[in-house]
Amino acid sequence: MDGIYIVLVVLGFVIGSLFSLLALAIALGVLLGWIVLLVMGISRLRKGSSAGVVMTVLGFVWAAVAVAAVAFGAVGYRYASSALVPTDFNADSYHGTVGDIILPNKTPASLVLCKEETLRRLRVTVSDGRATAPVGSYKVESYRASATDQNGDEWTAEWDPDREQSPTIVVGAAPVHLDVGPPFAASVTSETRRSRAAVADFTLVITGAGNRPYTVTNHSPSASPPGLQVLDKAGRVVWHGNFEYG
């Protein structure tokens, strides 16, 4: 069975590579085929053939279309790339109309907003519980806050919702309230599975404002992983360990 599996994997790789090469050849033929047509047309023109005029004109038209396709593709790629990467918004240098986003805490943070009309992403700074953004309708794509504890360790809290779960806010003349950020609360959930013996899975869950899930990271290389203790009814420790994934 292992041998058959390896053969199928290799066969799939070879077929995929052949299809990729075929697609590349077709793309090059479409983009560069005008060269052959143009050379043939010029050659026939020199021989006095009237077909050379048609072939030369078609070659130039084909070349113009190919150059336009490459140019439009480059512009589209540049636009898509710029839309994916958030741009830091500076309210002081912005000359349009802006509005305020109010958070329920004073923690310094940043928000990444995706404008629904243009799909462009902005990173706005949260200071003293307030952020400023151009007016419009936005999807909130992320929240990030950092702080340093008494030991000098940097902690980061991040919230990255799925597209379906991302809230929509409308920034306008009136301030809009966004329920994200601290205070954070840690809890442990457990699930019992049965195979040959009962197995308990423990999961560390950190939630904040709006009961949203957050990822909290300690960036110190010497930081200890979070752990837990399991007690019986008498308060005795019957098991202790660390969370496997952070």
Image (spheres, rainbow, N blue to C red):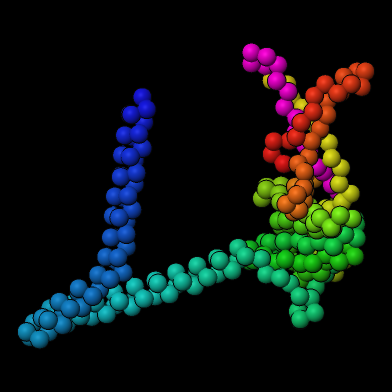
The residue drawn where x is 87% and y is 19% is: 232
Locate residue 242, reporting x and y percent.
75, 34
Q: Residue furthest top?
A: 196
Whether residue 180 is visible here, answered yes or no, is yes
Locate residue 157, reporting x and y percent.
78, 52
The magenta stretch spans residue 202? yes
Report the front residue among 20 and 193: 193
The magenta stretch spans residue 178? no
The residue drawn where x is 71% and y is 70% is: 88
The residue drawn where x is 10% and y is 81% is: 44
Report the front residue among 63 and 48: 63
Report the front residue among 231 and 73: 231
Tell me: residue 20, above or below residue 10: below
Report the front residue among 148 and 21: 148
Question: Is 158 displayed left or right of 58 in the figure?
Answer: right
Magenta residues span 194-211
Tell me: residue 17, above or below residue 242: below
Whether residue 50 is visible here, answered yes or no, is no
